[in-house]
Image: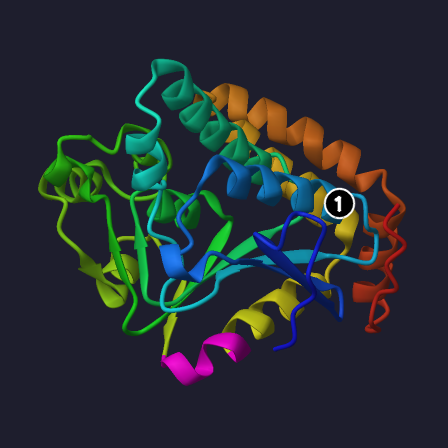
Amino acid sequence: MPVTKTASESLVLRNDRDGISTLTLNRPKAYNSLSINCMEAIMKELQRTSEDSSIKVVVISGSGKGFCAGHDMKDLRANPEKSFYEKTFNTSSKMMMSIINFPKPVIAKVHGIATAAGCQLVATCDLAVAEENARFATPGVNIGLFCSTPMVSLSRNVARKHAMEMLLTGDFISAERAYEIGLINRVVPFEELDDAANDLAQQIASKSPLTLKIGKKAFYEQLDKDLKSAYEYCSRVMVENMMAQDAEEGIDAFLEKRNPVWQGK
């Protein structure tokens, strides 16, 4: 797939096609580890993409042999100051939240390894597709640095005991196991990864962009509410959604047995 260099020092490559923007982490020699500059570049590209009405879905992938090996340990050891550590992990948390708050669906396309903050990135994306030989881990415990920030997204995607096992052992799990515990959505042969991610993205991109925006926001908003509050909140969201032109068009199209024409309004 062709990629286009961006102004972000080529740390993130962007390729747009058919309403789908693929953002490729581009530090292959470092297994796409998340330096501060790389994380800032991701946020810049997400901001640009959020303002592009032609883009309906974003896919995040990695160049080289693996998806992402987490934070850049060489950078962290080369800058042993508390202020640098604070900037690194605060930037990481801000980047992860920028994906959650991003108004369009984000799909992780995973090959090779996704470890530590790379595994966190997979868990943070709305959906994830992986090739069958991909492996996932939160291995910080093995080097005396517990994966506390990756734990946040991991524990919100898989059951507690599965999350704790990954966090406490630091062991790799297979793509099939990641699928079983709910960390990823689909597992495919390596040669089918691009098509699988693109097919899923195209399916989602065919929906009303306004409806996707409303639904994604509501999904994350209701998660931490108690049951009664969640229903009250989502009832309000449904009413507001019903007032949208796209909802009227979609319902009319369903009743008239035709394809809807979305306006994003």
Tell me which residue sits at (86%, 69%) in the image: 256
Query: What residue lies at 70% left-to-right and 65% top-to-bottom?
Result: 4
Specify how the rendered protein is coloured: rainbow
The amino acid marked with disc number 1 is Arg
Check the image and report above or below for 194 versus 141: below
Q: Is residue 230 visible?
A: yes
Residue at the front extreme, as displayed: 78
Does residue 31 appear in the picture of this structure?
Answer: no
Magenta segment's dominant SS is: helix
Magenta span has 51?
A: no
Q: Say left or right for 152 vs 198.
A: left
- Closest to the observer, 16 or 69: 69
Q: Position of residue 143 (x, y in %)?
A: 14, 37
In the picture of the structure, the residue carrying the numbered disc 1 is 48
The region drawn magenta spans 189-195
Secondary structure beneath label 1? helix
Position of 98 relative to 171 (above/below): above
Image quarter for residue 60? Answer: bottom right
* The C terminus lies in quadrant: top right
Figure check: 244 above or below 184: above
Q: Residue furthest top?
A: 82
Residue at 32% from the left image edge and 53% from the top image edge: 182
Q: Residue 159: image x %, image y %?
A: 25, 41
| Displayed quadrant of residue 24 | bottom right
Q: Position of residue 202 (x, y in %)?
A: 66, 69
Residue at image point 57% right, 52% down: 11
Front-lying residue, 69 or 185: 69
Task: Check if residue 194 falls in the magenta segment.
Answer: yes
Q: Is residue 174 left or right of residue 47?
A: left
Percent position of residue 14, x then y: 66, 60
